[in-house]
Amino acid sequence: MNTTKKTLTIILSIVLTISLTSSSFAAPSKSLQVHFIDVGQGASQLIISPSGKTMLIDAGNNDQEDDIVAYLTKQKINKIDVLVGTHPDADHIGGLDAVIDNFDIGTIYMPKVQANTETFKDVLLSIQNKSLKVNTAKSGILIDLDKSLTVKMIAPVSTYDESNNMSAVIRISYGSTSFLLTGDAEQESENDIINSKATLKSDVLLVGHHGSNSSTSQKFLNTVNPKYAVIQVGKNSYGHPTDITLKKLSSKKITIYRNDKQGDIIFTSDGKTINVSTEKTSTTTNKPTTDTKKPSTTTKTTTTTNTNVTYKNCSEVKAAGKAPLYKGDPGYSTKLDRDKDGVACE
């Protein structure tokens, strides 16, 4: 009898050890947490489900990879159940290789688009080194993260020349609360999402492309109709977020949160209500700075192109490692500069 008890004790200990080491290790709760991690001029969102499952969407730029690893470790996470690289831009996937190297990884999703950059190659190498499989990110995929959540990928709907429009767009709903996470999806993708009849109404919107004019069309914003908007942005020379985007949000009385003003931003939902906490309190306004300016009636739009180098689209620019292009740079053209701010393919 004593021998039997001892044997059972050993077996239970082994089972418990296996169970603990294979879990995400985020503490289970009845709340959904959506973290918008401050990675400077980049993007990264961590989702911790009510049962403690984890999903990481993007991981900021290369120089933020140590910070991402430290942030996840601080959350007591040792496994990422679902990892999503929305598209190949370095400010989104730069830290993914470090995440893959330092944590157990479950399912990986990335869109079917490539980049001829060392950053992209590093991510693929880390995936290969762990013998992981990449699933294609596209509209219509239901992500199995937690039985209490509905996590649906609603873009990319089609195939696009512009890599930003290949961004994986994900909507998460928990009870009566919802979040829409958009990567760098621009207006072409936004229009296709609307036409696909996917559910877009959400309480929290991650503003596309760091608040650039190329994203967040009025029609898209009206359809989503969020209470809160998050802009993942840091110090930059692109003019992000633009005054036009801020004005659209302010005119709808949407509460705006920004990583450059408030640091890490965490939304917590119990399925009925949403609470927000921030790393630091913002002391500056989110209102646009050019409300009083009137557009010039004599402005003429022209296409200025450097004839020495030409690019068909921004995907070619990024593949050549030349993004962003500033006005006057070889290959710059107003055709590529979608928001006409003097910076193309940002």
Image (cartoon, helix red, strand yellow):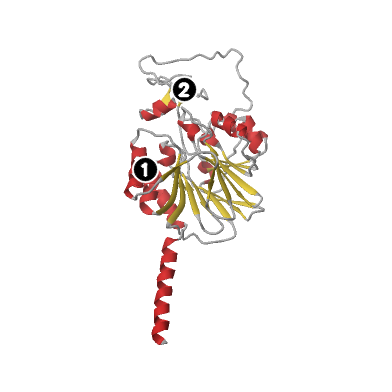
- Depth check: 86 or 139 in front? 139
Separation of marks 2 and 1 at Cα, in angstroms = 27 Å
> Residue visible at 40% across and 26% down?
316
Pick out the residue farthest to the bottom.
1
> x and y percent of residue 202 in the render?
63, 43
- Look at the numbered disc 1 and give the secondary structure of its residue: helix
**Quarter holding the C terminus?**
top left
> x and y percent of residue 256 in the render?
60, 41
Q: Identify residue for label 1.
A: 123
- Look at the numbered disc 2 and give the secondary structure of its residue: loop
Q: Residues within 10 Å of mark 2 (few under 14, many from 20)?
A: many
Q: Is residue 121 above or below residue 54?
A: above
Q: Is residue 298 above or below residue 284?
A: above
> Residue visible at 50% across and 35% down?
184
- Depth check: 123 or 160 in front? 160
How many marks the image carries: the answer is 2
Left or right of 144, for residue 197: right
Q: Residues within 10 Å of mark 1 (few under 14, many from 20)?
A: many
Q: Identify residue for label 2.
A: 336
